[in-house]
Amino acid sequence: MLIAAAGPNIAPVPTSSSDDRYVHGFHDSVLRSHRWRTADNSAAYLLPRLRPDAHVLDVGCGPGTITVTLADRVPEGWVVGVDSSPGVLAEAQALAVSDGRRNVRFAVGDVLRLDFDEATFDVVHAHQVLQHLGDPIAALAEMRRVCRPGGVVAARDADYGGMFWYPESEEMSRWLSLYRSVARGAGGNPDGGRRLSSWAQAAGFSQVDASASAWCFATPDERRWWGGLWAERVTQSRFAEQAVEQRLATADDLRRLADGWWRWIEHDDAVFFLLHGEVLCTP
């Protein structure tokens, strides 16, 4: 069932099948991270550009927590969330229904072939999407196609070369190196945050405004949450499967990396910084 809302006609979300292209996969340790994200903590750079009546497309929306909080900012408009995974979209749709959001819809979609007419949206947004694509420039060009003149295309991506932590840890240094290798082996660019401006210019935007922001995990609860996610992810997620499939690590190697994360959590002075690049692009 689709949520009642104005906007383009969208086919109902299928509830089966999944997309194995995403390097992290859809293990609960991944989705718990995604469910934490909101417009406030993940799209603050975009919020001043949202009009109350804006029509917004959220590309790679995952479980929809950013999507529905963007909908709060456009009460006279509507938001469409698209993702390649029907399973995670079913969760997003259930969230919107449970929260009573009536200006949100969800649909299966591919950022390289968006099923919308040209100039449909005032805002086209993607969070942590472009770094996973083999052709991020083509994706930005497709986002530009469906954005209206005078609108904005917004993208934010982590930069794994801009991750820092204390205290130093051999296992966590190995984890970072392994992740970057796995991501590149899957066709992505784990240091995409620093390349967003270059990609956007290559995609033909008339103006590109770049910025950066960071997440910081430092309190005991934050460390336990963030470190615990990764301790699970390095042994149980699609990332772990690909590390073994690409012969970059063994199961024993991955267990040692998980142990390193658990040890890091226990340090009272531990902190983790995660830098993101951001761009606001004018078609």
Image (cartoon, rainbow, N blue to C red):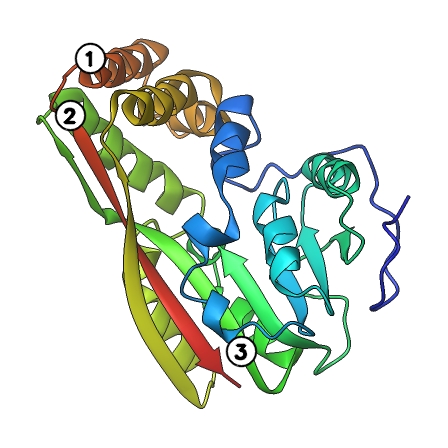
Does 34 sit above or below residue 268? below
- Labels 3 and 2: the sequence-earlier one: 3
User: Do the CB atoms of the residues marked 2 and 1 lie less than 8 Å apart?
Assistant: yes
Q: Position of residue 195 (x, y in %)?
A: 31, 66
Left or right: 55 with respect to 41? right
Amino acid at the residue labelled 1: Glu
Does 283 sit above or below residue 69? below
Amino acid at the residue labelled 2: Ala
Label 1 neighbourhood size at 10 Å, few (<14), some (14-19), many (20+)? few
**Element on which disc 2 rests:** loop
User: Do the CB atoms of the residues marked 1 and 3 lie less than 8 Å apart?
Assistant: no
- Labels 1 and 3: the sequence-earlier one: 3
The residue sitting at 46% across, 79% down in the picture is 281
Q: Position of residue 155 (x, y in %)?
A: 46, 64
Residue 266 is tagged as 1
Q: Which residue is mark 2?
A: 270
Residue at the left extreme? 168
The residue sitting at 21% across, 35% down in the picture is 272
Q: Quadrant of residue 176?
A: top left
